Image (tube, coloured by chain):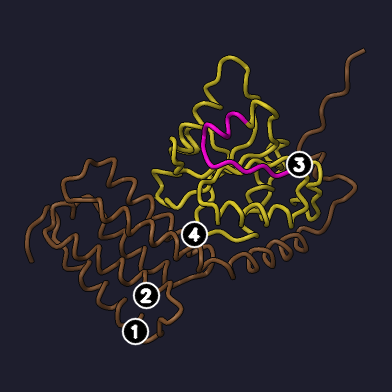
Chain colours: A yellow, B brown
Amino acid sequence: MGPDRADFTSFDFLVVEDNEFLSRLITEILHSFGAGRIRQVQTAEGALQEIAVHAPDIIFCDWVLPDSSGLMLLRALRRDNNGRYPRMPVIVVSGHATDDHVAQAIGEGADSYVVKPFSARTLMQHILKVVTRQEGVLYLG
Amino acid sequence: MASAPRPTLLERMRGPNARPIDLLVERGTASAAHIARHYQGFARARVEEIARRLATLSGGAPDAEWQRFCDMVQDLRSSSATCGDETVSWVSGSWEKALDPQFRGEPRLMAVMQLHLDALRLAVSENAGGAELRALAGQLESVVKSLNPAGGTA
């Protein structure tokens, strides 16, 4: 049985999305969920800079970014051998719904994969999935 | 003395300000609906960006150029679908099909792309009528189906 209540007031989210409309949409939804802190960047490079300043609790990352891609960002985070980036959940957000894309993202270390279009309920389900997975609690949303 | 371990995300989520998840989703849905009401202005600007990019795109453009263009159309499709704009989503989805690399050598591809651009401009205009858009959608479906792989002619 998964949680039926949630407190995100201490959570720090990083939204990596170059589509300013979708970035605003995700941010407003997270704000409605009561998120304590939400940072927005449009590029993978910007994301790495933000993460270096303060590691977020959960990252929402678009798969297609102007300077590189969500894949490059995932690789930078997961293949880091210098301990610069702690293990933090990454939820990929993508317009590509093929099995190949999902498998590649998960294979590279994504914790979850949201296919656009998405709803507020979908975002909540993916947040709960990555939060509960850390302690082996199964969320069936 | 060793410091206490940092609470896990799950422990923090069970904090003192916990609210019913259904209530949070309801609030998020209301926020999303509010934001989506402003989508058409964004879509209009994005369609004009696509038009500018299309003007510089030729059949012989490098794959990377085509990929960037595909990403723009796909971004419009997914953002419009998320914001509930079914017409823009449908037209950009149809355009995505026409952008499949197998049609890259089709002599009519540029004309088909222009038709999709015209349809998108109509879809984001404030004067578009439902009947007009439905007729256009039918035409787009036919022309995309008539495209031949590897540039052959129908």
Q: Chain of mark 2?
A: B
Q: Which residue is mark 4?
A: B79
- Callout 1 touching callout 2 (CB < 8 Å): yes
Around disc 4, counting alpha carbons within 10 Å, would you say few (fewer than 14), some (14 to 19), or many (20 or more)? many
Which dot, 2 or 3, sits closer to the camera? 2
- B124 or B27, which lies in front? B124
Point out the tag, 4 or 1, that comes first from the N-terminus: 4
Say few, some or many: other residues with alpha carbon within 10 Å of mark 2 (under 14 / 14 to 19 / 20 or more): some
Mark nearer the viewer, 3 or 1: 1
CA gap, disc 3 and disc 1 = 48 Å
> Tag 2: residue type?
Leu
Q: Residue at x 13, y 57 (%)?
A: B106
Is residue B147 located in the magenta-colored stretch of the structure?
no
Q: Which residue is mark 1?
A: B132
- Image side of residue B57 versus residue B32, left or right: left
**Mark sitting on residue B122:** 2
Q: What span is in magenta?
A: A37-49
Q: Is residue A66 above or below residue B34?
A: above
Determine which of the numbered discs, if any, sits on residue A11 in the image: 3
Q: How far across and how far down the image is residue B151, in percent?
A: 10, 55
x, y percent for residue B45: 45, 61
Label 3 secondary element: loop
